[in-house]
């Protein structure tokens, strides 16, 4: 008797129900350039270095429904990478680690996901159309980015003023009279 061959899963168009029923697993180290929207967030003066990688893994499983219905497909997604983004304090590049560790439950379609979303703690996704793991990974990594990336301590001194540093504001600015001085004089 022949053993069943291990199925080859397509991460760009994954049959999530079959993947979960088979307790499927995928993992890869892929270049950051494969994730175009994420790569656009990276600071790259001469193109992205080829050593920037996204390490990810996906595992599917069937879990019984909480209400006693048919088991539902679930996906555990993990990813990590470090990308250079612009520090919002010194405007230099800062290496920013991104980590994703999420579970998703799959339902029949988008309408079902929308109807159940408010009542569920878990993230819901639709089985149809077949999801792209790469798109889902990229979405999750983009959401993991900090709103304001900054160095803990910037490597260069940070100018904390809005004026032109070449002009000494104190010497060149005409002295304006205090508008309340006239009020004080009128009060007397």
Image: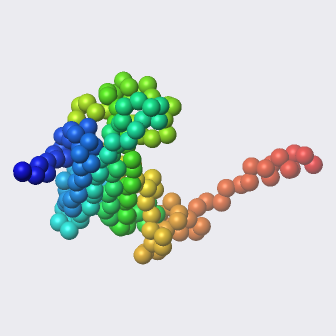
- Residue at image point 37% right, 55% down: 100
Q: Is residue 147 left or right of residue 24?
A: right
Query: Closer to the camera, 166 or 152?
Result: 152
- Residue 172 against residue 60 in the figure, above or below: below
What's the coloring here?
rainbow
Residue 167, compared with residue 72, is above or below; it is below
| The furthest residue to the left | 1
Q: Position of residue 171 (x, y in %)?
A: 58, 68
Residue projecting furthest to the front = 1
The front one of 104 and 150 is 104
The answer to which image quadrant residue 151 occupies is bottom left
Q: Residue at horizontal 51%, vertical 31%?
A: 119
* Residue 133 visible within the image: no
Above/below status of 110 relative to 79: above
Number of residue marks: 0
Any part of residue 17 in sight: yes
Return the residue nearer the eye: 49 or 141: 141
Q: Is residue 147 above or below residue 64?
A: below
Give x and y (percent) for residue 135. 26, 44
Q: Is residue 169 left or right of residue 70?
A: right
Quadrant hosting residue 63: top left
Q: Picture coordinates of residue 169 (x, y %)?
A: 56, 65
Q: Quadrant of residue 54?
A: bottom left
Residue 143 in the figure: left or right of residue 119: left
Residue at 28% x, 52% y is: 58
Q: In the rendered view, does 28 fall on the left or right side of 166?
A: left
Q: Nearer the viewer, residue 98 or 78?
A: 78
Residue at 51 percent of width and 60 percent of height = 162
């Amino acid at each position: 008797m022949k053993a069943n061959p291990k199925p080859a899963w397509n991460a760009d168009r994954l049959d999530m129900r079959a993947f979960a029923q088979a307790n499927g697993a995928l993992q890869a180290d892929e270049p950051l350039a494969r994730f175009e929207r994420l790569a656009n967030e990276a600071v790259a003066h001469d193109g992205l270095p080829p050593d920037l990688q996204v390490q990810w893994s996906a595992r599917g499983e069937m879990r019984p429904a909480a209400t006693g219905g048919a088991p539902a497909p679930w996906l555990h997604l993990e990813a990590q990478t470090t990308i250079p983004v612009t520090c919002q304090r010194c405007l230099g590049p800062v290496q920013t680690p991104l980590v994703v560790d999420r579970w998703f439950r799959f339902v029949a379609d988008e309408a079902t996901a929308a109807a159940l979303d408010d009542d569920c703690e878990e993230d819901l996704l639709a089985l149809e159309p077949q999801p792209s793991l790469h798109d889902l990974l990229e979405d999750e990594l983009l959401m993991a980015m900090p709103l304001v990336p900054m160095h803990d301590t910037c490597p260069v001194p940070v100018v904390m003023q809005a004026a032109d540093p070449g002009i000494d504001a104190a010497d060149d600015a005409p002295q304006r009279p205090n508008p309340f001085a006239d009020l004080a004089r009128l009060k007397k």
